[in-house]
Image (cartoon, grey):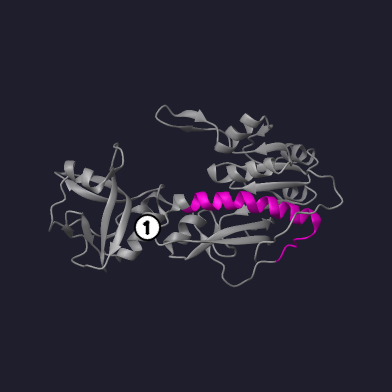
Amino acid sequence: MASSTGAPTTGDSAYPLRLAFMGTPDFAVPALQALADAGHEIVAVYTQPPRPAGRGQKARPSPVQALAERAGWPVRTPKSLKTAEERQAFAGLALDAAVVAAYGLILPAAILAAPRLGCLNVHASLLPRWRGAAPIQRAILAGDRSSGITIMQMDEGLDTGAVLLQESLPIEPDTNAQQLHDALADLGGRLIVEGLEGSNSGRLLPQPQPELGVTYAAKLEKGEGRLDWAESAAELDRRVRAFTPWPGAFFEVAQGDKSERIKVLAAEPLPQGGMPGEILDQAPTVACGAGSLRLQRLQRAGRAAMTAEEFLRGFALATGSRLPSGRAPS
């Protein structure tokens, strides 16, 4: 579905719209800021409660909460929206719409139905492809050539609601998850303003998602980042890019009677081959099941990220030696 163009028009209701925003991580921040910049009234911001973070494990507010507090918008951090008290409080806001972007809580039917225009979701994929928790990483891992933003009218299913608006972005051969995340977050900020205005005016009508093409983006697990040198260089390159910055792609190398985990932050697939796991040169380049992977940026545990040249000054990877293959449990 192509994005609409032209100046927004309003319906019979007053403008600006009364909104609640529901989101938590960095991805949601551009959407919240864009709605405020468009002149809408942010009457409440819902976000996940502060979580322990950093070395001191001090409770840290979410990026969305931090923005809301700077702007002076009321912040709510319920652990659930299923209680009668929370439902009543939400209904009492008398909202035109709620905008949801990576919030992290399930919205019950009563919450979905409370705003006049319902709840609109900013989702980081071209639905119905990559419904679920990790659409950005799964798209890169699968080798998709494009991703995008969908503005969806939420229902009780998992990203199954009708589509108001979509716009695609290319995934370049060297795009990593952080870069795609940032680009999609910015796009989401632009499209949610357009989608909200189109919904309010009736210019955009929700279209059911097609039944064909549904895929699910399962939650990421740390162990998925382990590099199995028996896989092709193309697959391992996608794994590095998909899991940067989190959970991180890594391999392990023996250090005496122990092993050390090394993160790979950037790499380049090459055609030259060898035995899977073999160190082919001092770039360093590692042979894979098909082709090889030149490691460009690495990080040892507890150390800063460094170039391959910097890494090799303090960590030997002898040419001709072999790194272990196989996706062992992390």
Residue 208 rendering spot, x and y as whole percentages = 69, 66
The residue depicted at 52 percent of the width and 52 percent of the height is 183
The residue lying furthest to the right in this view is 12
Is 170 in front, or is 57?
170
- Image height of 301 relative to 206, above or below: above
Residue 97 rendering spot, x and y as whole percentages = 75, 47
Q: Is residue 176 found left or right of 73 in the rendered image?
A: left
Which residues are the magenta region?
Answer: 180-207
The residue depicted at 22 percent of the width and 59 percent of the height is 286
Is 249 in front, or is 73?
73
Residue 205 rendering spot, x and y as whole percentages = 75, 62
| Identity, as a three-letter code, of the amino acid under mark 1 | Arg
**Rendering quarter of residue 91:** top right
Residue at disc 1, secondary structure: helix
| Residue 206: in magenta span | yes
The total of numbered circles placed on residues is: 1
State whether residue 104 appears in this view. no
Is 297 in front, or is 240?
297
- Image height of 238 relative to 92, above or below: below
Query: What residue does disc 1 label?
Result: 239
On the rendered image, what quadrant is the N terminus found in?
bottom right
Is 80 in front, or is 300?
300
Q: Is residue 72 found left or right of 144 in the rendered image?
A: right
Residue 238 rendering spot, x and y as whole percentages = 38, 60
- Image height of 48 relative to 229, above or below: above
Question: What secondary structure do most residues of the magenta stretch adopt?
Answer: helix
Q: Is residue 322 found left or right of 115 in the rendered image?
A: left
| Residue 75: in magenta span | no
The residue depicted at 42 percent of the width and 26 percent of the height is 56
